[in-house]
């Protein structure tokens, strides 16, 4: 894990399928997913994870129905406020990655207020990937570098122009619901990340699933291109 602390990325998939299997609307799956997320965050803290990146809403998710997108935006507005006490009690610092400009004003305010209210917490840092895409992240970093006058684009230049370059690259990415792809998540920083794919739908996750992911990760040998 190293002195800098472990960085875990989670692709939270399967909310809709969880709801459909119970003959419930997809929105019920998203609400259940929020409840499981709180358990997973606690599991990450219990396992000494220092950084947790969560794929909350991708740049492609705007293609979903207007009703579903609206519901997800309302969750950002309401749930961030309602969990502020939980964040501060457990030392959780909240940040975001992604382009927040298209979000409703209520959601943007809730996000910014949460970032401000948790800025001094230092047990774990959570990055909420909202209106986020890995390709867009790289493109925006290159554009930012060029606008600053940099003419030679290197991997170091790209990473230094990310929103939060102080957060180390992700060590392991886990995805729920049996899908086996990254879906445009942390593309640059996942170059040498370990990948773990789990069949369990996201609303069924709890603290034990984080432990299982990290146990599998602990048995991987990361060579970073070498032969050790």
Image (cartoon, rainbow, N blue to C red):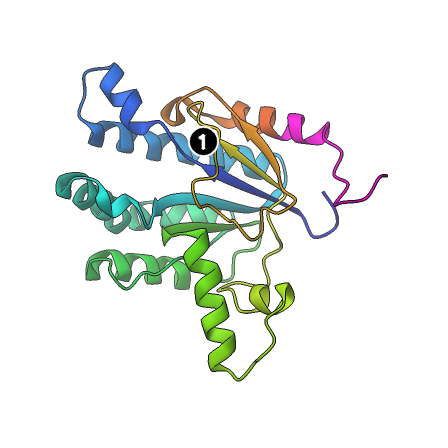
Q: Is residue 54 magenta?
A: no
Kindly tell me whether residue 201 is visible in this rendering: yes
Seen at 30% across and 51% down, the residue is 81
Seen at 16% across and 39% down, the residue is 65
Up the image or down, 98 lies above or below 194; here it is below
Q: Nearer the viewer, residue 194 or 86?
A: 194
Query: Mark 1 sits on what residue?
Result: 39
Identify the element where label 1 is drawn: helix
Magenta span: chief secondary structure: loop
Q: Quadrant of residue 14?
A: top left
Up the image or down, 26 lies above or below 65; here it is above
Question: Which residue occupies the extreme bottom position in the image?
Answer: 149
**Image x and y of residue 53, in percent:** 49, 46
Q: Is residue 30 left or right of residue 146?
A: left
Q: Quadrant of the N terminus?
A: top right
**Image x and y of residue 2, in percent:** 74, 47
Question: Which residue occupies the extreme top position in the image?
Answer: 22
**Image x and y of residue 188, in percent:** 55, 53
**Image x and y of residue 196, in percent:** 57, 29
Seen at 38% across and 31% down, the residue is 13
Q: Quadrant of the C terminus?
A: top right
Q: Which residues are magenta?
A: 214-228
Up the image or down, 137 lies above or below 185; here it is below
């Amino acid at each position: 894990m190293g002195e800098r602390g472990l960085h875990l990325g989670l692709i939270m998939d399967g909310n809709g399928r969880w709801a459909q299997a119970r003959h419930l609307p997809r929105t019920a799956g998203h609400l259940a997913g929020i409840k499981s997320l709180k358990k997973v965050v606690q599991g990450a803290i219990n396992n000494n994870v220092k950084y947790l990146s969560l794929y909350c809403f991708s740049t492609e998710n705007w293609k979903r129905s207007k009703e579903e997108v609206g519901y997800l935006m309302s969750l950002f507005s309401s749930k961030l406020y309602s969990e502020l006490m939980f964040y501060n009690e457990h030392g959780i610092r909240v940040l975001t990655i992604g382009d927040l400009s298209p979000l409703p004003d209520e959601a943007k305010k809730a996000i910014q207020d949460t970032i401000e209210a948790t800025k001094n917490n230092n047990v774990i840092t959570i990055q909420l990937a909202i209106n986020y895409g890995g390709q867009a992240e790289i493109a925006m970093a290159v554009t930012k570098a060029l606008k600053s006058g940099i003419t030679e684009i290197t991997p170091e230049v790209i990473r230094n122009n990310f929103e939060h370059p102080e957060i180390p690259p992700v060590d392991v990415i886990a995805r729920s619901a049996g899908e086996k792809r990254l879906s445009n998540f942390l593309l640059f920083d996942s170059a040498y990340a370990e990948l773990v794919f789990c069949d369990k739908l996201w609303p069924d996750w709890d603290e034990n699933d984080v432990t299982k992911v990290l146990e599998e990760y602990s048995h991987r040998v990361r060579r970073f291109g070498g032969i050790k």
